[in-house]
Image: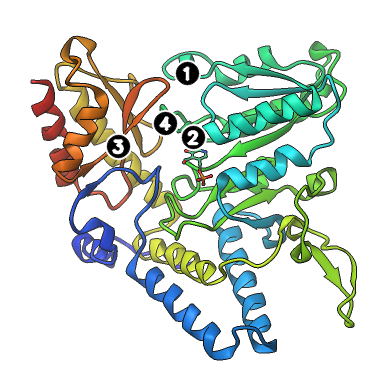
Amino acid sequence: MMTMNDEQKPKLEVYRSQFPGLKNKAYFNYGGQGVMPQQALNAIATSHADLQEIGPYSESRNHWVAGECYRTRKAIAAELGVAPETIAFTENTTGGCNIALWGLDWQPGDHLLMTDSEHPGVIAAVAEIQRRFKIEVSICPLIPTLNQGDVVELILQYLQPNTRLLVISHILWNTGQLVPLDRIMQLCHNVNQQPEHRGFKNKIKVLVDAAQSVGVLPLNLADIGVDFYSFTGHKWWGGPGGVGGLYIHPDTQNYLHPTFIGWRGLLFDPAENPVGWKPDARKFELATSAYPLYTGLREAIAIHHQWGNAQERYQQILKLSGYLWQKLTEIPGIICLRHTAPESGLVSFQIESSRLTSKITEESISKSLERQKIIIRTIPQPHCFRACVHYFTLESEIEQLVAGVEAIVS
Ligand SMILES: Cc1ncc(COP(=O)(O)O)c(C=O)c1O
């Protein structure tokens, strides 16, 4: 892959003009939904038109679908640093988490460890699995480790000999904390080999919610050895809503069983008779999808490479989130949850309670900012505002947000 040096980089304003969603606002909700480049919108429309032309259902159409799946899987896999056959298409992050959660053969008394910062849909799925299979669930409190302490040591304290699965986000959606995934994987995969951890008979599998890390971090998952990594295209990649994926480590694929089952997971002989499962992550795919969205996601991923490689983009995200964090810390009455510059594009902050009244609440503040075309969101736990910056965020947008916040608290 070729990356551009500074002189070749398109001027930021020109680059940003490819994203219609950036035109009329200062946008800070990339962790909720990213902005789609016009090229991705066009590619989706073109794919729909092409499908009508060659199908909608025909041999040529089937060939086209197979090609789109192949090319998009390959593009996603390259971003994650893994082989294409380890990726199953899903609709979203939560869908991929559900494939991993429900696919383990849970036995009564098994233990699942989850952090205190997981997303509501994942928490709800775990609660239902706990009810149905009578497993034990405990919560590892990561929120207090945002500014101090060692996440890996804390997780170790919460692991039990009967722990089968750790559920953890790579970047916590509430505080923006980046967890040391490589060390967590070493802990969970080697816990049964350490004499001091007697009682652990098996490796512990790890399911990572990557909703906030894919499109932000440079990734090389093959090196880290993670078991399950569930992500979506519609947030930091700026793809269309409705396409995500689940990475399943090759050694873990046989350990997991499909829960929802459909023709896409099956192998067929030349006479179109099913002859078994597909031998890789595709086994977990179901049936017909909105394939033109795959084209759109691939186009969205490709656009980011115009600006720079994954490392350069992440460094720029850090530079800009550090700038926002610094500016916010200078405002009396604003408390940034982090005491040091962010490790991600998420900047979470609170307004001192003395500055809030029954009329001026966090919700009313975020609505008032939205009326000024400054888009951020509130987070329920810990109760705070969350502003996301991307690598193409303008310093002037950050200054606009800071001025808007300052006007509210002064
Ligand atoms: C950590 C995390 N997990 C899951 C989700 C849900 O994402 P999706 O709609 O892709 O399932 C989000 C955000 O919405 C999130 O931040």
Do labels 1 and 3 touch, CB within 8 Å? no
Q: Find numbered disc 2 in the image and state the secondary structure of the residue it sits on.
A: loop
Q: Can you tell which mark lies on residue 321?
A: 3
The quarter in which the C terminus is drawn is top left
Q: Is residue 269 left or right of residue 13?
A: right
Q: Position of residue 32 (x, y in %)?
A: 40, 43
Looking at the picture, which amino acid does disc 4 mark? Gly
**Pointer 2 residue:** 171
What whole-number distance in Å separates the C-alpha atoms at marks 2 and 3? 14 Å
Compare marks 1 and 3 and give the one earlier in the sequence. 1
Do labels 4 and 3 touch, CB within 8 Å? yes
**Pointer 1 residue:** 143
Cβ of mark 2 under 8 A from ligand 1: yes
Q: Find numbered disc 4 in the image and state the secondary structure of the residue it sits on.
A: loop
Cβ of mark 4 under 8 A from ligand 1: no
The answer to whether 27 is drawn above or below residue 195 in the figure is below
**Pointer 4 residue:** 176
Q: Residue at x 79, y 44 (%)?
A: 252
Number of other residues with Cα within 10 Å of mark 1, as a class: few under 14, some 14 to 19, many 20 or more:
some
Do labels 2 and 4 touch, CB within 8 Å? yes
Q: Residue at x 47, y 14 (%)?
A: 144
What whole-number distance in Å separates the C-alpha atoms at marks 4 and 3? 11 Å
Identify the image quadrant of residue 114. top right
What whole-number distance in Å separates the C-alpha atoms at marks 2 and 4? 6 Å
What whole-number distance in Å separates the C-alpha atoms at marks 1 and 3? 20 Å
Looking at the picture, which amino acid does disc 2 mark? Ile
Looking at the picture, which amino acid does disc 1 mark? Ile
The answer to whether 87 is drawn above or below residue 266 in the figure is above
Looking at the picture, which amino acid does disc 3 mark? Ser
Query: Which one is in front in this view, the residue at disc 4 or the one at disc 3?
Result: 4
Number of other residues with Cα within 10 Å of mark 2, as a class: few under 14, some 14 to 19, many 20 or more:
many
Compare marks 2 and 4 and give the one earlier in the sequence. 2
